Amino acid sequence: MPTANLVSKHFGNEKARELDWYRAQGGYEAARRALFEMQPEEITEEVIKSNLRGLGGAGFPTGRKWTFVPKESGKPNYLTVNADEAEPGTFKDKYIMTWDPHRLIEGIIVCCYAVGIHTAYVYIRGEYVRPYERLRDAIRQAYQGGVLGEKVLGKDFKLDVFIHRGAGAYICGEETGLLESLEGKKGWPRLKPPFPAVVGLFDCPTVINNVETISHLPNIILNGGEWFAELGADRSGGSRLFCLSGHVKRPGVYELTMGSPMSELIYEHGGGILDDRQLKAVIPGGSSAPVLTADCVDLSLDFDSLAKAGSMLGSGGVMVLSDSVCMVKALSVVSHFYAHESCGQCTPCREGTGWLDRILMRILEGDGRRQDLDTLLSIAEYMQGTSICALSDAAALPVQSFVTKFRSEFEYHIQHKSCDVENPEPALAL
Amino acid sequence: MSSNFQFTPENLEEYQDILRRYPVKRAALLPTLHLVQAQHGFVPAEAEQFVADLLDLPVVDVREVLTFYSLFHRREMGRHHIRVCMSLSCWLRGAGRLKRHLGEKLRVESGGVSADGQFSWEAVPDCMGACEIAPMLQLDKDYYGNLGNQDVDQLLEGFNGPPGDPELE
Ligand SMILES: Cc1cc2nc3c(=O)[nH]c(=O)nc-3n(C[C@H](O)[C@H](O)[C@H](O)COP(=O)(O)O)c2cc1C
Ligand code: SF4
Ligand code: FES
């Protein structure tokens, strides 16, 4: 069965956020086992075996990331949990924090014990007020119930967990922008290396993982790394939450094992295309992921399959576009976002995102020029690999893929000063 | 320099609690600004000096951070603040219509405050992490989604009540 409920089991259940109920269901048993029956290195070993990949976007193998933290740095180590969830099309971490906050806390304990960390910060986007309140209440219960604090579950292991609220900046989801923001600065990403595992928060070794990544840890401890790996596809272990949105009948969060077919997500879970129209395109991993044409429904949803198809699984945000969409207008919505969110440190990104946005606007206003498409493509080319963080690449990839795969729609716009899609959603005037 | 802004006793206590979370004082800046905004509705210029003094920072550093983040306001907003998501999934499901309707209803453009001071609103290009209920908006602390024009009308009416309405915090 490709549907799974490893992290979504308690979604919709009001009781799950109560510590007593969570414990009665076997909650915190994984943390207890990790603390009392395993050595820290054994935990990391299980996580490596599990093929758990980072679910925030980049897909980096989680266990391996932990091994980059130096053994004896003489400084404290930190965990920062990335709950910024700002990649357009992504809304899964909100569900975990709202419905199953203790699973996240339990995962934090497992990670911190494995890496030797005594302080964890959860960086949550400022807009998420209700999810913040739920998580805050669960953390309070955990302190009162002896799950966090001086002696975690009675073991001589101290752990503090704090929540830090962001204040509305996409770039603070990028891991080093996040660290800067947590330190009380504007969220300007840092040049790497040094990587955060060596020089991170307050110049100390720091693990950064996404909310969902961390929330998979309890199940991996309970059932073993091999079990998790086998549930998934080749090098993508277990399951993940897919955020299905756009032109489907039933948008929502669906947990599927890695390697499940795209068609199952869109047609079985999503109920098919809105208004029974034809599928035109899918953006499979948040708005930074290159767009795919309708034949992508045969692809498997795992990191390697989507990379092979020239896109990425990214943050699990699957956005579905029906044949009612004008691709020029859709791209302009995406490009406008990146132009707005570039932090401005690097010239290729600051100038490039603005330029892309303006050319697309110009085409939509009927002032497109014959050479505009080549200009778009050359700017997008120049923006990749030339900047401090991956936002620049993330802004370039949609332009490249939209213009290449739907070139005739762009050409039609430039030639006819209008759209060849009937009654499309109007362009956004911001 | 001294400043006219002060925390209430409860917020001063909350501030002390915030400080304990970090090994470096400056890290308390964002939470402290959130606290100022929660108390005052926006972050007035006097509060910049107040926060700078509290955290031993030059006031320019406070200003730099304050202006970087879009959730902080530096002028008075409406009694309720609305942010409408204009990102891709919401656009696909009618965010453009939602935005037009809200502007007509409140008789003020994005970024403005309604004449009665009840609502301020803005259209934002960022996805708010709620694409499953597109098109959506945030009103104060809560998200509202799947919004047709009538839903918006009802929503606004519900928040138009007299002061003391339990919904208002
Ligand atoms: C521009 C940009 C925005 C990002 N936004 C997020 C985000 O909102 N949430 C997240 O978990 N990761 C985000 N990431 C990825 C993080 O940099 C980092 O890879 C991730 O938090 C690591 O955790 P993981 O390995 O568990 O995925 C973003 C990356 C970039 C370049
Ligand atoms: S690539 Fe863009 S967002 Fe990233 S650091 Fe450079 S200017 Fe800022
Ligand atoms: S696009 Fe509007 S909430 Fe995601």
Image (tube, coloured by chain):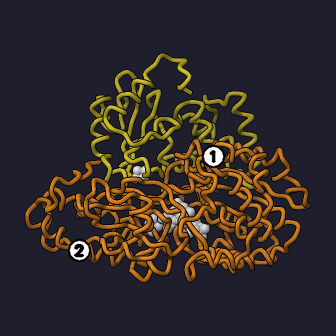
Query: What residue sits right under mark 2 in the picture?
Result: A375
Instruction: Please give the name of the residue rendered at 87% of the width and 54% of the height, measured from the top-left corner.
Output: A150
Q: In the picture, which chain is yellow?
A: B
Q: Quadrant where the N terminus of chain A lies?
A: bottom right
SS of the residue under disc 1? loop
Q: In this view, does B169 lie above or below A373?
A: above
Q: Residue lying furthest left in this view?
A: A416
Which one is closest to the eye, mark 1 or mark 2?
1
Determine which quarter of the picture holds residue A72. Answer: bottom right
Q: Is mark 1 within 8 Å of ligand 3?
A: no
Instruction: Please give the name of the residue rendered at 82% of the width and 73% of the height, measured from the top-left corner.
Output: A40
Q: Mark 2 lies on which chain?
A: A
Q: Looking at the image, do the residues carrying marks 1 and 2 touch, with CB atoms under 8 Å apart?
A: no
Q: Nearer the viewer, residue A342 or A152?
A: A152
SS of the residue under disc 2? helix
Residue A366, image x, y percentages:
12, 59
Asked whether the residues under marks 1 and 2 belong to the same chain, the reply is: yes
Q: Is residue A225 above or below residue A94?
A: below
Q: Is mark 2 within 8 Å of ligand 2?
A: no
